[in-house]
Amino acid sequence: MDVLSDAVAAMRTGRPHSSRRDKHAPWGMRFAASEGAGLHVLLRGSAWLIPARGEPVALGTGDVVFLAHGRGHALASGLDVPLDGAVPRPAGNPPLKDPDAVMLCGYYALDRGRTHRLLTELPEVVHLPATVGADRSLRAAVELLGMELEEREPGSDAIVTSLLDTLLLYVLRAWWRRERKGTGWSAALADPAVGAALRAIHGDPAHPWTVEELGAAGGLSRAAFARRFTTLVGEPPLAYLTWWRMTTAGKLLREADLPLRSVAERTGYTSEFAFAKAFKREYGMAPGQYRRRA
């Protein structure tokens, strides 16, 4: 299984949203803090991203920024522009001139209670500057999304939703390629032994995995594997297995009309009682109550 895709799917809720914004200088937009994550692509012109923490980031044509942590931020044509200075153009009135900046703005609703560890490592701002010849898949997805938002042909709603999901994965993949380090999740996904164990866990979370089995998947002894996994992932193998099982259970309860017995079996529990006890310990409520709230 693809660990990155799984991690994103587990915390995503509902459908992502997007819009195209044509701006005439001077302009400034403030985005409030939220439970979701934000994505901006500058299709034309230049702008400043002003994050809640850290220094402003200068953006140029083709730049992509992803803000994973839901903190407030702003976009503006200049650092001295009032952030409430953007005045919407009345519907039906054509623009007086070509826009100085054209942007794609996307929003992903997330379950912050189950944020995957690999997403918590992301910085305040993931900035991917446009580079000739680099990240061709990312650029192709951006171009397609821009076309769909501009033309709004039949089927655009479904296409835009799929492209936003695709774009998010391309953004994360591109960032990890550029920022690969010796520790953390970028290293864990690239490590042959730990990567093999993670794929095994995600591929079959119901299997009664042991540390020995997971280590054997990557060709390491039990002790060597446990040390390496804990160093890179930040917790022991079986602790991560339990966390992923409960994350999978939450997603099944939210999105699938399965009896609790089936959810328990799919997440490695031989009885509903054992599953319900583990679930309540993790979520603070019974599985049935969680499903009703969801």
Image: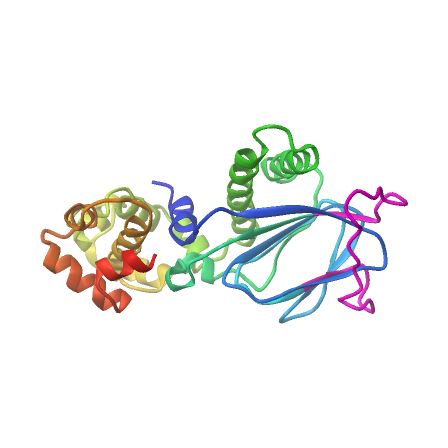
For residue 190, above or below residue 273: above
For residue 78, above or below residue 10: below
Residue plotted at (18% across, 50% down): 260
148 vs 3, nearest the viewer: 148
Is residue 189 toward the left or the right of residue 152 in the image?
Answer: left
The image quadrant of residue 78 is: bottom right
Query: How many numbered dots are placed on residues in this image?
Result: 0
149 vs 64, nearest the viewer: 149
| The residue positioned farthest toward the bottom in the image shown | 53
The image quadrant of residue 262 is: top left
Is residue 138 toward the left or the right of residue 194 in the image?
Answer: right
Residue plotted at (16% across, 53% down): 210
| The residue positioned farthest toward the top in the image shown | 154
Q: Position of residue 15 (x, y in %)?
A: 48, 46
| The residue positioned farthest toward the right in the image shown | 96
Q: Position of residue 125 (x, y in %)?
A: 60, 61
Residue 137 drawn in magenta: no
The image quadrant of residue 1 is: top left
Task: Tell me the chief SS of the magenta region.
Answer: loop
Q: Position of residue 35 (x, y in %)?
A: 49, 63
Q: Which residues are magenta?
A: 74-103
Is residue 67 toward the left or the right of residue 287 in the image?
Answer: right
- The colour scheme used to paint the residues is rainbow
Q: Quadrant of the C terminus?
A: bottom left
Residue 79 drawn in magenta: yes
Residue plotted at (89% across, 44% down): 97
Q: Is residue 240 visible?
A: no
Q: Is residue 104 visible?
A: yes
